[in-house]
Amino acid sequence: MRKLMACLVALVATSAANAAPILFGTIGSSGNSYPFGGGDTGATSTRYQQVYNAANFPTGLQSITSISFFNSANNAEAYRTGTYSFYLSTTSAAVNGLNTINLNANLGADNQFITSANLSGAMPLGTITYTGAPFLYDPSAGNLLLEIVYTGVEPSPPYRGFFDAMNGSFGSNSSRAHNYGTIFNSWGLVTQFNVEPAAVPEPISLVVFGGLIVGGGVVARKRLLAKKAVA
């Protein structure tokens, strides 16, 4: 019985495929400082949002396991010192359609904290990855929204920490909004998400699983009655 249950559990939990990278933008493109640098010197907080076209993701429920940015321009710049908190949600906003007056209006009902990082000093070259709580995302429900909330006080100089970005050239793939300055349609950081299919029970396996539980209960009851009869 236990062996059967173990085999069934292994069947029901669909094995997740290896994480696959979904890249928005071109690595090695022009740099942009926001939100890891920027012009709001002296500000104690910053909100940055970037929306990603759902059509670029695989179909079906999936788990986003990490977020990556890129510094390939050999910039010897530094992070704007402070704490960066990362959130993901499913948004009803269109690419180049973020609400720039009320950033809360862009957040989805499933808005989820992913991770936070205390950043300072020189920005490393290459790929910079942030990993935290997996986010379950269904592209059929809307576009993906990334929000980065910065807290801290950065003295001058104001512009620091340039990541690879698509400045005015994201088209229908991505765009950004933030609470400093104005909206830049088709602007945003080159971003990579690692995704894997979310493990969900297969309907036929659930039926078999339910039958096995019932059958196991009947067998256990018969054994109990047999023991009572012997006693």
Image (tube, rainbow, N blue to C red):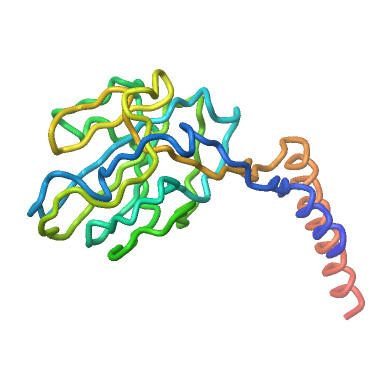
Q: Is residue 18 left or right of residue 89?
A: right
Residue nearest the observer in this picture, 28 or 37:
28
The quadrant of the rendering that contains the N terminus is: bottom right
At a point 76% along the width and 39% down the height, the residue shown is 207
Which residue of the protein is positioned furthest toward the left in this rendering? 42
Q: For this rendering, which residue is in front, 129 or 17?
A: 129
Q: Quadrant of residue 122?
A: bottom left
| Residue 189 image point, x, y percent | 37, 38
Give the x, y percent position of residue 103: 20, 34
| Residue found 49% across the figure and 41% down from its top | 192
Does residue 31 sit above or below 139 in this rendering?
Answer: below
Task: Name the side, left or right, on which 231 lies relative to 27.
Answer: right
**Image quarter in which the C terminus is found:** bottom right
Q: In the orientation shown, which residue stands out farthest toward the right?
A: 230
Residue at the image position 36 percent from the left and 45 percent from the top: 163
Q: Which percent across, then down, holds residue 140?
A: 50, 24
Rendered location of residue 116, percent (x, y) = 34, 59
Observer-nearest of 165 and 130: 165
Q: How many marks?
A: 0
Q: Residue drawn 28% across and 20% down?
A: 97
Horizontally, residue 214 falls left or right of residue 65, namely: right
The quadrant holding residue 166 is: top left
212 vs 126, left or right, is right
